[in-house]
Amino acid sequence: MTDTLQEVQQQPAVWRETAAMLAARSTQIEEFLEPVLAQPDLRIVLTGAGTSAFAGQILAPALSRSLRRRVDAIATTDIVSNPQEIFAEDVPTLLVSFARSGDSPESVAATELAVTCLRSVHQLVITCNADGKLARTHTDDPTALVLLMPPATNDRGFAMTSSFTSMLLTAWLVLAPKQDLQLADQLAAAAEQVLARAEELTPYTGRHYARIVYLGSGALAGLARESALKLLELTAGMVVSYYDTPLGFRHGPKAVLEERTLAVVYLSNDPYTRQYDQDIATELRTAIGDDNVLVVDAQPSAQPKAQDSARDSVLQIDGVADVNDAPLALPYVVIAQLLALRFSVALGRTPDNPFPDGEVNRVVQGVTIHPLQP
């Protein structure tokens, strides 16, 4: 697991490097985005496949709220298969593409279909691979801006880790209004805290869970989905993972709970939303026991651990209590990455290559892009 572990551990450093890169290109970024974002009827579409799509799902609710405009998270896989439905509304569009390699067949196809279906489209390409087809296609396009992540984020391991978090951070810093680049350092310090406390996760990975459920609200719903995928990937499907929102989970999916289930609940920093997150955490503790519920929180506890036994199952991250839920997903997801790594090793898998027979590939294969008939 040498590559994957290194790529998880390097994230605080590459987040700081990413912020420095954005600062160096701030004028160019502003000149590209300012006139695009000034369009009153602009639609922003965040796209990618797999983990890259989940970056959009984390960002879309928070960006829609902060920008006061329409922001949709739509996977490239949905755009490619149903472009005329996705782009049925011919309005000015900013297509934001997330891609680690930029060589997945759907990556370039989605950008081409946007141009085919829409009269006015600009492209913001956020990628980790300067040599990828997506970056090469759009580098000289006057209606596009390519933002390359630090080279180390082009993960060599099978699963996306530092690529995912660096691209998510970039999109938040350049699209959310009035962002201070010092946020990257704040998030990096929180992630360093998580990495230093990695041993606190050992009791969970030693219990041989058959199922793991991740729950989060709003922006953290996308994080729950990414967390579930990371576990599924690195254990090669040997541990069943599930994701949902705290409120949605009660409407049938709660049936997944059984005696060998671990539930991970991400608490929102929004005071209204976190009430629902806390409610489901309390309900789960009653249903499957405190030891089988891990709550991840950025707010200081009102009760000392000695007076609240449930606090033993809370992983509290200091220093990010004032952070929006979208960027808060960065230190939160490090916990999910570490859990997935540890479960993978405990099950005898190889995290860098959990599918040695090639059933699932680092860059998706076997996709035929069919021409769109007029």
Image (cartoon, helix red, strand yellow):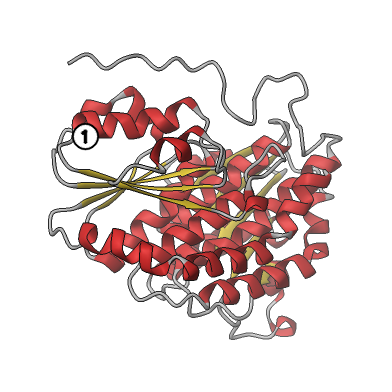
Q: Amino acid at mark 1?
A: Phe
Characterize the local packing of mark 1: few (<14), some (14-19) or many (20 or more) Cα atoms within 10 angstroms: some
In-front residue for pair 254/135: 135
Q: How many marks?
A: 1
Q: Is residue 54 above or below residue 198?
A: above
Q: Is residue 314 above or below residue 348?
A: below
- Is residue 233 left or right of 56 when viewed as pictured? right
The residue at 72%/43% (across/down) is: 260
Can residue 80 be seen by looking at this rendering? yes
In-front residue for pair 163/211: 163
- Is residue 187 left or right of 348 when viewed as pictured? left
Name of the residue lying farthest toward the front: 140
Image location of residue 120, percent across then percent down: 17, 42
In the rendered image, the quadrant that contains the C terminus is: top left
Q: Element at badge 1?
A: loop
Q: Is residue 352 above or below residue 67?
A: above
The residue at 71%/31% (across/down) is: 236
The residue at 77%/39% (across/down) is: 351
The residue at 33%/66% (across/down) is: 30
Can residue 286 be seen by looking at this rendering? no
Q: Quadrant of residue 364?
A: top right
Image location of residue 267, percent across then percent down: 52, 66
Q: Is residue 165 above or below residue 98?
A: below
Q: Quadrant of residue 81?
A: top left
Image location of residue 338, percent across then percent down: 73, 54
In-front residue for pair 180/207: 180
Image location of residue 87, percent across then percent down: 21, 34
In the rendered image, the quadrant that contains the N terminus is: top right
Residue at image mark 1: 87
